[in-house]
Image (cartoon, rainbow, N blue to C red):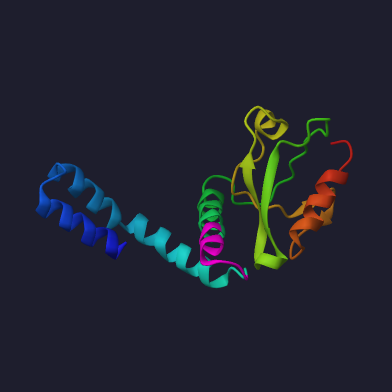
Amino acid sequence: ICRAIELLEKLQRSGEVPPQKLQALQRVLQSEFCNAVREVYEHVYETVDISSSPEVRANATAKATVAAFAASEGHSHPRVVELPKTEEGLGFNIMGGKEQNSPIYISRIIPGGIADRHGGLKRGDQLLSVNGVSVEGEHHEKAVELLKAAQGK
């Protein structure tokens, strides 16, 4: 963020971009919200345990940060969501798991899919269990297997 602000100041001096646009962007970058996002990102980056390239780690951190903020809006209490199991699947993707030192989150609601039509799940929700079987502290693949094997509602 500091580097972005430095670049904004450089652009202001160059006169290539209207000053009001640069000032608006600078206010956003210096806002409490942006600072909160940066702090969450840095915390998540330090806790994500991925032995891969810095780009992969940064990408996983960015997704987890978005999921954390999405989860903080609206529903913050555990709830039961029942989705009918059909040939088209459940209509959502998950990310996270023990191997990433992260809870399992809903990373995507597929537009027009079962979860989207049902409306009970949203991106960023944490998956706690599938048909009564806990996935807290489990590997990603275990949660995928449970979701694929889920029966009925």
Compared to residue 53, the image places residue 146 above or below, namely above
Percent of width and height locating residue 88: 78, 31
Q: Is residue 36 left or right of residue 52?
A: left
Residue sitting nearer the eye, 128 or 23: 23
Compared to residue 90, the image places residue 48 above or below, namely below
Q: In this view, does 102 lie to the left or right of 13?
A: right
The quadrant in which the N terminus is found is: bottom left
Specify the quadrant of the image occupied by residue 32. Answer: bottom left
Q: Is residue 5 visible?
A: yes
Q: In this view, does 95 lie to the left or right of 40?
A: right
Compared to residue 87, the image places residue 45 above or below, namely below
For the image shown, how many numbered marks are present on the structure? 0
- Please name the residue shown 78% across and 51% down the image: 144
> Which span is picked out in magenta?
51-59
Residue sitting nearer the eye, 69 or 113: 113
Percent of width and height locating residue 101: 65, 68
Outermost residue, front side = 53
Percent of width and height locating residue 106: 65, 48
Specify the quadrant of the image occupied by residue 100. Answer: bottom right
- 136 in the magenta segment: no
